[in-house]
Amino acid sequence: MKIGWRSLALLLAALALDAQAGAPIVRTRIAPTAVTIGQPVTLTIDVLVPTWFGGAIEYPPALAIPDAVAKLSDERAVNLNERIDGESYAGMSKTYVIVPQKAGAFAVPAIALRVPYAVDGKTAVADLKTAPQKFDARLPPGAEDLGYFISTRSYRLTQQVVPALKDLKVGDAVTRTITQRATDLAPMFLPALRFDPIDGLELYPAEPVLAEQGGQRGAPGVATRIDGVTYVLAKPGRYRLPGVTVGWFDPGQAAMRRAEVPELAFEVAASPAPVAVVPGVGSGQPVAPPSRFERLAGRWRQVLAVTLLLLLSSLALWRLVPAAGRRLRERRRRRAASEAVAFRRLRVAAGRGDPAELRCAAVAWVDRVVPAGDGGTLAGFVRGYGDEGLGRQFAALDRMLYRRAGEDGAPWSSRDFVRGMTAARSHWVRSRTGRRPSRHGFDSLNP
């Protein structure tokens, strides 16, 4: 095959650019630097290389920041193209969303990144670190004296009373249950409720029950806290159980809100004296009323039974909910790291039509199939398992990305490239099943 003078000049220019290229660059910025508790802070990380990326950058899915929730944003990375000191750099920008859970100064630690990029036609790996960042979080007006702070987009406070507050008498028991529900908040941040003693009522609070549900497939998580108390009615009279008010901050509206349940009013009658019929006597004769201990003994058994039930339920949730969460997170981690998910990302990148993103996704998939350290590369996979059509598309893709547009060859099509990769993947699967070695020396895929 003859090489024209123009193609040769472009090739020599590309090699010279590789030889003179500088080192990769990482830039870090945070905004805003002062927020109200519960409002998000954005940490932006730009990574630029003097040539092109040789694979995907592995970002930590979450950051360890005390009293804050910091996660990698689900938004797509932004591609960058810049000239720095007269050189062309390609890059991408990713963000983390940080939500402070208390007031104070916060420090965002440096993040270690491994960046694969091309050097002299080969893939090198640069170890970079982001610059540490700081921001402050403050309480909103109206929350200073609460003694707690809740930041959520949805909060509900409800109560339930058993039995109905009518026809009550001394010796009866009344159970009041108050439930808090909030979205995108850990149950531990929901405030504990206090039930003050009331003269004439004997108070038996139950252990609180905390639980967390949802949060899968982008759905909001729901935190729940249940506080219960049982009142044994010891004296006749009129009683009022105070209402409960909880203040919470709505970050969407940047405003404090209040949720409340009303007070409960009821009347307790004296326990009637029992009447016994004495054998042989025609009329009933009143007998001495039972002692206070005898009146309340039956109710105490009910109270103990309810308390034991709540305690057992709390213990079951304490054991089962974290274990189920760990299993779910492990399944997600294994699925996210699977070869099938990596190939699905390749298909999605092809649908977007971005050549650089598609090549990075293809390199990342090959890395899942066989690590680069074991000899696996995208070019090797195309040679070992692809057909001539895939080879032409791969060459056309590299011409487009690596500034070799003047060369002759087949036009590049993301659809044809993915079709060829799909067929090559099927060839690879069959070779793995049959344990047959590759015809073109891509042996590291077939141990």
Image (cartoon, helix red, strand yellow):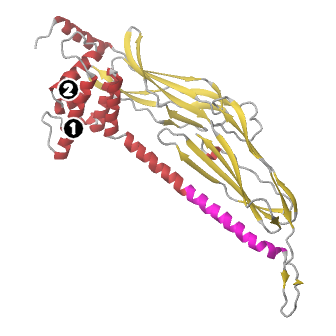
Q: Quadrant where the N terminus lies?
A: top left
Q: Which residues are magenta?
A: 292-318
- Percent position of residue 155, x then y: 65, 41
- Real-space CA distance between mark 1 and mark 2, rounded to the nearest whole angstrom: 13 Å
Query: Is residue 447 visible to the viewer in this orientation of the structure?
Result: no
Q: Quadrant where the C terminus lies?
A: top left
- Percent position of residue 370, x then y: 26, 37
What number is the disc on residue 218?
A: none
Q: Is residue 95 above or below residue 228?
A: above
> Residue at 66% across / 47% down in the picture?
180
Please name whichever residue, 273 or 366, is drawn nearer the observer in this view of the structure. Answer: 273
Left or right: residue 145 versus residue 374 is: right
Name the main secondary structure of what is drawn in magenta. helix
Q: Earlier in the sequence, mark 1 or mark 2?
A: 2
- Percent position of residue 21, x then y: 34, 15
Which residue reaches farthest bottom? 280
- Percent position of residue 213, x then y: 55, 47
Indicate whether residue 315 is drawn in magenta.
yes
> Residue at 43% across / 32% down in the picture?
59
Q: Is residue 370 above or below residue 408?
A: below
- Which element carries disc 1, helix, strand or loop? helix
Q: Say which quarter of the image contains residue 17.
A: top left
- Residue at label 2? 390
Which residue reaches farthest top? 5
- Which element carries disc 2, helix, strand or loop? helix
Please name whichever residue, 151 or 82, is drawn nearer the observer in this view of the structure. Answer: 151
> Residue at 23% across / 25% down in the picture?
416
Task: Say what amino acid the circle numbered 1 marks.
Answer: Ser
- Residue at label 1? 426
Task: Say what amino acid the circle numbered 2 marks.
Answer: Leu
